[in-house]
Amino acid sequence: HLDTWNERRRSIAARYAEALPPVVGRLIALDGEDYVAHLAVVLVEEREAVRSRLQAAEIGTDVHYPIADHRQPLWGAMFAHVQLPVTEHAAEHVLTLPCFPELTDDEVDRVCEVLREL
């Protein structure tokens, strides 16, 4: 089953990448045979606006790793001097779209439709 599930997630992620207008953002994707699309993460400039629009359409989203590792409270001031602009930008702009094998084609179509409307 695992190969089938992985292929389904890759297919869903590819459809999102195609539907997302470049002006809104882009799918953070990896290539290669090991890529399984465990998460469909998009990098968007206006994360909260995009998230709100998807939520209004009853489409769930998530934000994985909203705080860059070097800014986690656990570290206190230990890394306060460290500047990682790419990491910090990603933490502020990543948004995870629904991507699981049981997602129906109609549900994927709906997510893509809302993405195209952005």
Image: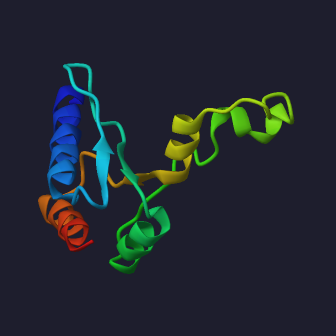
> Residue 30: where, in percent of width, then height?
28, 29
> Residue 99: where, in percent of width, then height?
30, 49
Asked if 44 appears above or below 75 in the picture, the reply is below
**110 horizontally vs 69: left or right:** left
Image quarter of residue 80? top right
Residue at the outermost top position: 33
Q: Nearer the viewer, residue 49 or 33?
A: 49
**81 horizontally vs 96: left or right:** right
Residue drawn at x 16%, y 34% as measured from the top left? 7
Quadrant of the image for the C terminus? bottom left
Residue drawn at x 26%, y 20% as measured from the top left? 34
Q: Tell me the colour scheme of the image.
A: rainbow
**81 horizontally vs 86: left or right:** right
Image quarter of residue 8? top left
> Residue 71: where, in percent of width, then height?
72, 39
Asked if 89 appears above or below 78 in the picture, the reply is below
Quadrant of the image for the N terminus? top left
Q: Nearer the viewer, residue 84 or 11?
A: 84
> Residue 6: where, in percent of width, then height?
23, 33
Residue drawn at x 86%, y 36% as measured from the top left? 76
Image quarter of residue 60? bottom left
Asked if 10 appears above or below 107 in the picture, the reply is above
Residue drawn at x 17%, y 70% as measured from the top left? 113
